[in-house]
Image (cartoon, rainbow, N blue to C red):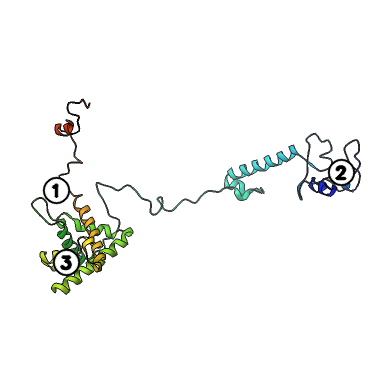
Amino acid sequence: MSDERVAGRGRSGPDRTAAAKPDGSHDGPAAAQGPKTDQPGRLAMQPEDSSEANAKGTMTRRGALKVIATTAAAGAVASCAPEDAVRGTDSAHESLSGFEPVPPTNPRAAGTLTDPDMLSPVVPWEMVLTDEEMRQVAALADVIIPADDRSPAASAVGVPDYINEFVSAPAHKDQLTQLRGGLAWLNRTAQERFGAVDFSALATVQRHEICDEICFEPNAPEALKPQARFFDGFRDWVSTGFWTTEEGMRDLGYVGNVPVPSWDGPPAEVLERLGLAGEDLG
């Protein structure tokens, strides 16, 4: 390995070939140039016990730590000081002082959700369906759930209002487009096939004739697959709106959401079927 490569790997400093004096100083040009640096622009750190460190203008490790600590403390004090007290200072950290976030003009950020008031519910958006569209929605809903001896028709328990609220929500624009497209097809078919003004003007048997073609997508003609998908989605809306009403729950025989004063355990026939008859389940 050459001397040049060895020298290239060493740290910059006094000429290693210069003769050293007994007190540790060096003769030659390197000593006359003042303190050496580890990197450009940085003072070389001297041992803390170097007696000539201050005399030669170099900085000891302890001195460097003092500068760092003092700078950090000054920044902390300036940033915590009252704004009017800091403005009059010449501190280099004045720009960091007196910072206080501007309070929002609205105490609650726009769009923040809150728990709904179930006792006094309020719908925060406008209803978009027209009176004509509401009549058509009611007519189609009653095809799906008509009145019988067990319960009233879907339109009688507010299902059209539920659907109107659902599709009017800002997040349900796609469903609104789907609904209006389906109603437009029903009205056009009613006019072309029966000469009626719209779907709601048809007799019950005529409504059924049209709906039978789209009520089950696997059996629908290929050209009517989109209309069948519309009908399938509309049926879900009607079912949800109807069977979440008190009348719909009674129609299902649902007995939940009712306080029970006492509990006698599962019926005997259920326990017997499960092989638990006579078992102590307490």
Question: Circle 1 sits on which residue?
Answer: 251
Q: Name the element at disc 1.
A: helix
Cβ atoms under marks 2 and 1 closer than 8 Å:
no
Q: Label 3 to label 2, Cα distance in Å?
A: 103 Å
Cβ atoms under marks 1 and 3 closer than 8 Å:
no
Q: Nearer the viewer, residue 233 or 228?
A: 228
Q: Label 1 to label 3, Cα distance in Å?
A: 27 Å
Name the residue type under label 3: Ile
Identified at 60% across, 49% down, the residue is 96
Compare marks 3 and 2 and give the one earlier in the sequence: 2
Identified at 17% across, 28% down, the residue is 277
Name the residue type under label 2: Arg
Horizontal relation, residue 276 to residue 58: left or right: left
Give coordinates of residue 210: x percent, y percent.
16, 66
Compare marks 2 and 1 and give the one earlier in the sequence: 2
Name the residue type under label 1: Asp
Horizontal relation, residue 238 to residue 19: left or right: left
Question: Circle 2 sits on which residue?
Answer: 16
Q: Label 2 to label 1, Cα distance in Å?
A: 102 Å
Please tell me in which quadrant of the rendered image residue 270 appears: top left
Give coordinates of residue 86: x percent, y percent.
61, 47
Residue 196 appears in view: no
Cβ atoms under marks 3 and 2 closer than 8 Å:
no
Mark 3 crowdedness (10 Å alpha carbons): few <14, some 14-19, many ≥20: some
Q: Work out whether 254 lies above or below 195.
A: above
Mark 1 crowdedness (10 Å alpha carbons): few <14, some 14-19, many ≥20: some
* Mark drawn on residue 197: none
Q: Name the element at disc 3.
A: helix
The mark lying in front, picked from 1 and 3, is: 3
Question: Circle 3 sits on which residue?
Answer: 210
Identified at 29% across, 61% down, the residue is 175
